[in-house]
Image (cartoon, rainbow, N blue to C red):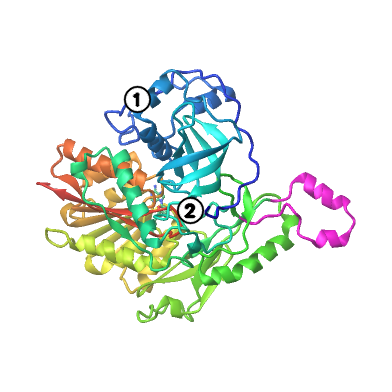
Amino acid sequence: MAEVPSVGTARAPSPPSEPPVAKKPRLEAPEQPVSLPVSTPAFKTASKPKQSKTQKRRQQYNALPEPCSSDDVLWREITEILGEEYVNTNLAEETDRLSPFEYHQELEMQVVAICSTGSALATSTESSRPWVVVVPFCFPGETVRVRVYRNARLHSFADLLEVVTPNPEFRDNSLVRCKYFGTCAGCQYQMVSYEKQLDLKRDVVVKAYENFSNLPRSAMPPIESTMPSPKQYEYRTKITPHFEAPTKSQVRDRNSNNNPTDRAERPEWFDIGFNRVGTHKVIDIEDCPIATPIIRETLPAVRANALKNIWTYKRGVSLILRDSLAPAPASTTPADPATDPDSEPHVCITEHRGHIREKVGPLTFEYPASSFFQNNNAVLPSLTAYVASRIAASPGPAPTHLVDAYCGAGLFAIALAPTFNTVAGIELAADSIRAATRNAALNGLPADKISFRAGDAADIFAAVRVDFPPAKTVLVIDPPRKGCDGPFIEQLLQFRAGTVVYVSCNVHTQARDVGAIVNQSAADGKGGKYVLESLRGVDLFPQTAHVESVAVLRLVGDP
Ligand SMILES: C[S@@+](CC[C@H](N)C(=O)[O-])C[C@H]1O[C@@H](n2cnc3c(N)ncnc32)[C@H](O)[C@@H]1O
């Protein structure tokens, strides 16, 4: 028997089944991907009659998951296991919520697949009907004992109780380095060799493009092996442990207790850390081995301080611990390209209003602690070098102009700038734009070569239309998890940059957007069409199921 993570606390039972009110949607593939908001209607729709809360809840209960959401990713993989016909029949006959399993029923199951969310999908030959059970921390080929804690549409969620038959192809429990692994929701794969983790992440990219891009296989390039992170532990440069404030009754209890010794102790309800797997409940975490050394060293003091002040908090708090290089003696001096970031002294910034300084290869970046920057510094030199190499592989004349949409503090714009004549970046967050402008100067890039503006990403096209020759322009896009919106894709197709590099922290919305760009460019008759030239996952978060992805699109044919 393999050692298994401890089981979570008892969970609330599933909500009672509500009678469905509307016919359920079927699963037939839509002619156009349902999720593409590529054109917004030019007309105003009639205002809908107001719904009661119950009606809204019923509608949500009956609706299929929002396209490209993690529920949707799970749902598609469940459908693949059960078969579309079976799923459609159950939806039509409204038998999709008739679970064969009771709340807290214990079962032995066979794991048949690993889902892109990192959980395993299991079935049982003893089940009275085909049904999938979603279980964390196990792998295909394993027999596991589980306890059901929630029933949903044609699937249930369960805690792992025991791995009855482990699969050594995936599992080596001696690799686990964290005492919270199996309870904390942060990591999924500590018991998997790093090589295998990279393979699992490649599979996520493959499945994302199969399920969400609406592209035929012939339009997909061979998907490269996942780019590894040089550090597999102690890489995370930012963590945000959180805790709940005391409730009114906890405050009352404390005030009625006159014993000062008791008052000084840690209240038994006080937990500070990350969520317990499968819940929104915080568990107490004293150390996080994927965080950088300075963050691990600082965490005990930050926890102690939160505990000292716990009775002053009125609502839950999310703390921040961010790794930074110690402030430069004079931060306006250009970065010393020879210095290795690991050999410089680090500090941990715990103030949202603090400032971070970070080196990516020879480049220096400074930005406010509360704003976005990639959380794995160790892999950034390989990531930016890979993007540069894909751009350089352009078959035509070398590109001269670069647009960095969703540019944050200027990571890609600044790292790629040396081979371009002119660079423009755009970003919604004004403080990130101020940081990007300053970072360009810090790295010796003149303002007449590189400029940044605050605004919606779609606005960049109006700004560069006159001066940037589309065929010699590279467009880098790195949007948030929800991907690009319709107006942005419309503008992108209108502008038709020679190369588009799409960097993404959500390969599912990336697949949807890339599919839209490829398919629409072939159909809109505006000259040239985009082909997906390369696709590669990048591991920014070892030990977790998360994968980032870089897709390169090239405009081919006469523009
Ligand atoms: C995944 S981050 C990438 C940042 C940057 N490329 C980097 O690697 O550091 C996405 C960025 O998009 C910005 N953003 C979100 N919505 C946006 C929009 N509609 N237009 C422009 N920027 C946006 C966010 O503020 C965030 O900085």
In front of the other: 537 or 131: 131
Residue 388 horizontal side relative to residue 547, left or right: left
Q: Which residues are magenta?
A: 245-273
Residue 261 lies, in percent from the top left, at 85, 62
- Residue at the location (54% across, 73% down)? 347
In front of the other: 67 or 278: 278
- Residue at the location (44% across, 33% down)? 65
Query: So how many labels did they put on this image?
Result: 2
Look at the image and tell me whether residue 68 can be seen. Answer: yes
Is the residue marked by circle 2 packed among few (<14), some (14-19), or many (20+) residues within 10 Å? many
- Residue at the location (32% across, 26% down)? 28
Look at the image and tell me whether residue 484 can be seen. Answer: no
Residue 293 lies, in percent from the top left, at 53, 71
Q: Quadrant of residue 72?
A: top left
**Label 1 vs label 2: CA separation?**
32 Å
Q: Quadrant of residue 374?
A: bottom left
Is the residue marked by circle 1 packed among few (<14), some (14-19), or many (20+) residues within 10 Å? few
Residue 361 horizontal side relative to residue 120, left or right: left
Lower position in the chain sequence, tag 1 or tag 2:
1
334 over 437 or under it: above or below: below
Magenta span includes 292 = no
The residue indicated by pointer 1 is: 85
451 over 294 or under it: above or below: above
Name which residue type carries label 1. Glu
Residue 52 horizontal side relative to residue 305, left or right: left
Residue 75 lies, in percent from the top left, at 42, 35
Question: Is label 2 within 8 A of ligand 1 (CB to nearest ligand atom)?
Answer: no
The residue indicated by pointer 2 is: 188
* Residue 538, disc: none
Residue 222 lies, in percent from the top left, at 22, 51
Residue 28 horizontal side relative to residue 108, left or right: left
- Under circle 2, the secondary element is loop
